Amino acid sequence: MDSLITAAARALSAGDPLGALNFVALRGDAPALALRGIAMAQLGDLARAKALLKNAARAFGSKEAMARARCVVAEAEIALVSRDLAWPTKALERAQMTLEGHGDRANAAYARYLKARRLLLVGHVGKAEEALAGLEPASLSPALRTGCELVAAGIAIRRLKAPEARAALARAESAARMAAIPALTAEVEAVALVLDTPAARLIAEGAVRPLLLDEVGPLLASGALVADACRFAVRRAGKVVPLETRPVLFALARALAEAWPADISREALLLRAFRARHVDESHRARLRVEIGRLRKALQPLADVTATAGGFRLVPHGAEAVVVLAPPVEEEHAAVLALLADGESWSSTALALALGVSQRTVQRALETLAQAGKVQSFGQARARRWMTPPVPDFPTSLLLPAPIPIG
């Protein structure tokens, strides 16, 4: 490798893309094309970066397997940054195996990190943790160690383990200082702000107050009966009744929990669960059926009793009943939460991250665009959506699981 290529590579490692381009901007050989692609990616010109890396991979040829694999890893990073979550992950896995087979442990580790980061972004927390477990932090460069610790913090946040998240962020901050790359330091600071931003709201006996992530875990372990509107479940002390696929039952459970210890009228339940403003006998009959289904579903945790005025929730052994709600509740909140990271997303990527159909996401984006809450650029498959971060709004790291939208 000649001295200019070496100097450009060192500049990129130090986070100086302009310095790297000074060495290779006029060269068209394969190594220079690859380094120019990475530099353009760091400067934010992702389309140009992707084209340069593809050209570099072709220029290396079939005999340069390790160099081609490095180009694939760089393409995967660009796909992740541009939220192209449908990018072929098998290509990244093959590149990782090639790099490991040729002894390039640093770039193989980077490929594994990118895999973990993508898995976390689409909500596969367990698989992300498995991918991260194969990395030994002490053997990584400071920049890569920073990224891995940020993923570890994201996993801890998704699992509502605030102490573990803070510990991972402290390690990330230390590694970022060693790397001396301003962009990494800014990313760590941005994630740290998440822990000081309300992650949920507590609704109990008519009062509402914000909760930090540090308070959510202790609440779920406190023994109180919790109607969890973040995960659409009712839970107490480790016992969980999932209702994410039964929205009517969860709406009834939440209404009963918000009214506790008092009862709630049948008319109010009909309005909350069925949005029925003009009640007739068919609505009352359906309410009786759904209350029976809810009573059966909640049997391990609580009972639903009829009163003269309506219905009342009676928990088994719990001294309190509360509702854990997202910090902001509005139509299509899950889409806004992902877009709040400031990146541009395709509708395909949003659908993958939320676990819903692409058409559902497209309808949500159209509604939000009409309200002026999101904006798009590009056409057809190149169309991307974005919005400025919303104050006091949960970022994608706070999305615990795919949330039904619409």
Image: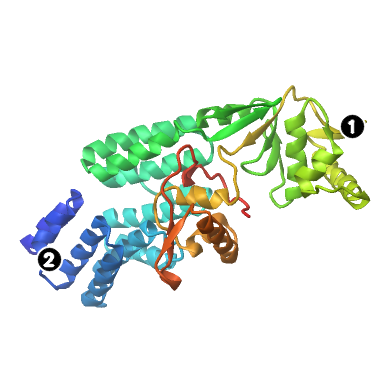
Left or right? Give the position of 193 relative to 297: left
- Quarter of the image with the N terminus is bottom left
Label at residue 309: 1
User: Which of the image's four quarters has the C terminus?
Assistant: bottom right
Q: Position of residue 5 (x, y in %)?
A: 11, 62
Crowdedness of circle 1 by 10 Å Cα count: few (<14), some, many (20+)?
Answer: few
Mark carried by residue 25:
2
Say if residue 65 shows up in the picture: no
Sequence-first disc among 1 and 2:
2
Name the disc covering residue 216, or none: none
Quarter of the figure with residue 344: bottom left
156 with respect to 276 (left or right): left
Instruction: Name the foreground residue: 367 vs 160.
Output: 367
Q: Is residue 189 above or below residue 46?
A: above
The image position of residue 346, as x and y in percent, is 46, 63
Please determine whether, in this image, residue 163 is positioned above or below residue 253.
above
Q: Is residue 288 left or right of residue 171?
A: right
The relative height of residue 116 versus residue 152 in the rendered view (above or below) is below
x 38%, y 58%: residue = 80
Q: Among all residues in the image, which is located at the extreme left?
A: 3
Give the residue type at disc 2: Ala
